[in-house]
Amino acid sequence: MPGDQHDAADSTEEGRPQLRMWDEAGQETAIGSLDDGEHRWTILVIAEPVAGDLVRGWLSFRLDDQRYDTAPIILEETVARVIERAVDFPEPMLRQLFAAARR
């Protein structure tokens, strides 16, 4: 029954906040690749729900067992929106993020 369901964001029990379960925690999605002149790196966006109804995202550049991650650079309301924003990054920006992540 709808009256029996509680929204985790607006209910507390004995003064403790309710925990919200996420199906999408740490979701990785390949969004393309970047050629650095020597190798072609796979680009993934990693989306992770955070407090409230926000999802943060960062990029991961991978080649075999090598991996370079950016700091979280996207904050949106859904995983899908984080992925959309990452896909829209222009190549010069991706190159700058890759160079920064390698430092």
Image: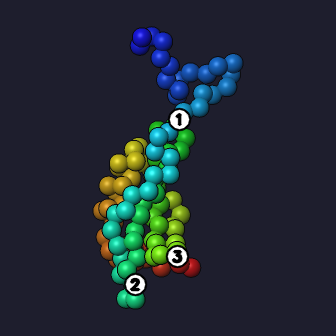
Please name the residue shown 69% across and 18% down the image: 14
Q: From this viewpoint, which residue is outermost toward the front?
A: 64
Q: Position of residue 65 (x, y in %)?
A: 52, 74
Given contact means CB atoms under 8 Å apart, are the residues at marks 3 and 1 in contact?
A: no
The local secondary structure at tag 2 comes to loop
Please name the residue shown 47% across and 75% down the image: 64
Q: Residues within 10 Å of mark 2 (few under 14, many from 20)?
A: few
Counting residues from the start of the chain, the first of labels 3 and 1 encountered is: 1
40 or 47, nearer to the observer:
40
Q: Which residue is mark 1?
A: 21
Question: Which disc, if any, is residue 66?
Answer: 3
- Which image quadrant is residue 78 in? top left
Q: Which residue is mark 2?
A: 39
In this view, 79 is above or below 92: above
Dot in front, 3 or 1: 3
- Which image quadrant is residue 45 in? bottom left
Counting residues from the start of the chain, the first of labels 1 and 2 encountered is: 1
Counting residues from the start of the chain, the first of labels 2 and 3 encountered is: 2
From mark 3 to mark 1, how far is it between C-alphas?
A: 31 Å
Q: Position of residue 97 (x, y in %)?
A: 45, 73
From mark 1 to mark 2, how far is it between C-alphas?
A: 39 Å
The local secondary structure at tag 1 comes to loop
